[in-house]
Amino acid sequence: MEENLGKIEVGNLFTIVDEDDQDQQMEVLGLLPVEGNDYVAAAFVEELEMDSEEDIDIYFFRIEEEGDLTFIETDAEFDKVSAAFEEAGAE
């Protein structure tokens, strides 16, 4: 899905292609290991830059061994990762 980013860190920007074949920039908001895999929480830069009271959408990606980011494909994995990030944010 995404080219190798090298060392992934909070604040890194990366580009994905959306369903309309448009490039969209995303920013890494957090990193967290969950059950032996590393995950990234990210949001669209455009949403982060808007001065709005609305919540922003957060997306989770799994970091593969090569450093590539892949979408989470199952609801069970998404629920597990989402809960782990929520718990980490509450600490």
Image: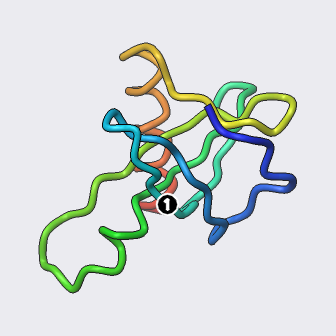
Closest to the observer: 68 or 25? 25
> Residue at horizontal 39%, vertical 40%?
18
**Element at badge 1?**
strand
Quarter of the image where one finds residue 39: top right
Q: Position of residue 77 (x, y in %)?
A: 48, 20
> Residue at horizontal 59%, vertical 47%?
40
> Residue at horizontal 58%, vertical 59%?
30
Instruction: Decide if residue 87 is on the left or right side of residue 38.
Output: left
Is 21 rendered above or below residue 89? above
In the displayed image of the protein, which residue is found farthest to the bottom? 51
Q: Residues within 10 Å of mark 1 (few under 14, many from 20)?
A: some
In the displayed image of the protein, which residue is found farthest to the left? 53
Closest to the observer: 90 or 62? 62
Instruction: Decide if residue 80 is on the left or right side of residue 52.
Output: right
Q: Amino acid at mark 1?
A: Gln
Residue at the disc numbered 1: 25
Q: Position of residue 41 (x, y in %)?
A: 51, 50
> Residue at horizontal 61%, vertical 29%?
70
Quarter of the image where one finds residue 76: top left
Instruction: Decide if residue 35 is on the left or right side of residue 25.
Output: right
